[in-house]
Amino acid sequence: MDLMSEFSRQKAGELIENLKRDGFDALLLFPGPNIGYYTGFNIGLSERLAAALIPMEGDPIFLVNQLEEELRGQKPWFTDKAIWMEDEDPIRLLAETMKDKGLSSAKIGIPEEAPWGWVNKLQAELPNTRLADASEQIGYIRMVKTPQELEWIRMACHIADKALETGFSKLHTGMTEAELSEVLTSEMRKLGGGQTFPGVLFGERAALPHGQPGDRCLKPGEAILVDMGCTIHGYWSDVTRTVFYGEPNQRQREIYNIVLKANRAAFDAVKPGATCESVDKAARDVIEDAGYGAYFIHRLGHGIGLQIHEHPYIVRNNERRLEPGMVFSDEPGIYIVGEIGVRIEDTVTCTQTGCESLTKFKRDLLSYPVKD
């Protein structure tokens, strides 16, 4: 068994203990990050059903189409398979497999990303089976990162930081958002990043939190908001910096400094035992006290790992307490539609004594010289 398979087996063991405690009889995973994390078999969602059935007692088994009989050459920690052919009903085969394992009247844990169509059909095949949401248990194991997971995220953050330096050094009048996006993507890949995402917005478009890079041209005096990240071994980085092309005016400076103060307040609030909502509040209070509360329109942060957005969510009404090894974003922002958007985002981790930022790019207000 290779190291990744052993990692998956250990994590599955931890999850099984938690599920047993909560009265589950089996775990049913579908394509997506969780099946890869807990079995070592990485497969994305398609129209062809694939699943992993892991009983609390007894042998686990994959259900896959004949095309996937070799499990894509991967080496998960178990390899028993139920194979369905193209002209067969895979849900019926899955139901029969569950019956064979004594699970026809069991409590089966499923993740939040489980496809509704498949789940609904399976429930019809097994009316006495309880298909129950196990997202809380599934998500908890993934929230607390191992030293190796932290190292991969740290590496991904370093690549993003370096790419930002390169991208900002190439700013010039008339450059489009799409052109800067391409520079950042190319640089992250050159430095060893796997998957990438680059969000680039200029001027008033920076007030669109999920805007996409377009043909908007850069002009002197504008804010530049870049939200980007990449993966190492499937683990994401996520960083946002807002910089200025030419000298910012007084209002731009004021808004930037408020957001920076909020970012630092949240950082200082992170420690073991602190609630997610208390960290959100630390940043939100800064922005509200400055009179811009109506323009901070999203939660402070989200977990980061195999998914760019995962648990824990740093948001009001989330009373989950932070633990060392949890990784998440610290990203306050102010968005004034039609005028300006400023966000400062770091990937951070809760440590034994407080907080560590895994993204290191400068947070001080930066202005870049105008170049024709």
Image (cartoon, rainbow, N blue to C red):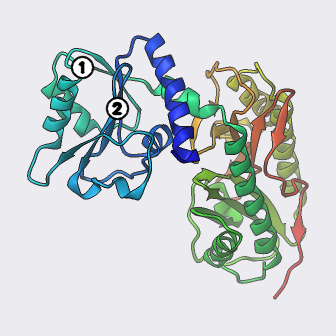
Of the numbered discs 1 and 2, the one sitting upstream in the chain is 2
In this view, 259 is above or below 54 = below
- What amino acid is at disc 2? Pro
The residue lying furthest to the left in this view is 87
Coordinates of residue 358 in the picture (x, y in percent) = 79, 47
Q: Nearer the viewer, mark 1 or mark 2?
A: 2
Q: Residue at x 48, y 37 (%)?
A: 38
**Number of residue marks:** 2
Quickly name the residue at label 1: 103
Coordinates of residue 275 in the picture (x, y in percent) = 71, 21
* Quadrant position of the C terminus in the picture: bottom right
Left or right of 166? Residue 261 is: right
Q: Is residue 306 visible?
A: no
Q: Residue at x 63, y 76 (%)?
A: 182
Coordinates of residue 87 in the picture (x, y in percent) = 8, 53
The residue lying furthest to the front in this view is 1
- What amino acid is at disc 1? Leu
Coordinates of residue 135 in the picture (x, y in percent) = 46, 27
Q: Quadrant of residue 73?
A: bottom left
Task: Identify the disc placed on residue 200.
Answer: none
Secondary structure of the residue carrying numbered label 2: loop
Separation (CA) of disc 1 from disc 2: 12 Å
Quickly name the residue at label 2: 60
Q: Residues within 10 Å of mark 2 (few under 14, many from 20)?
A: many
Q: Is residue 317 visible?
A: yes
Q: Residue at x 46, y 22 (%)?
A: 16
Q: Residues within 10 Å of mark 1 (few under 14, many from 20)?
A: many
Which sits in the foreground, 190 or 197? 190
Which sits in the foreground, 120 or 3? 3
Secondary structure of the residue carrying numbered label 1: loop
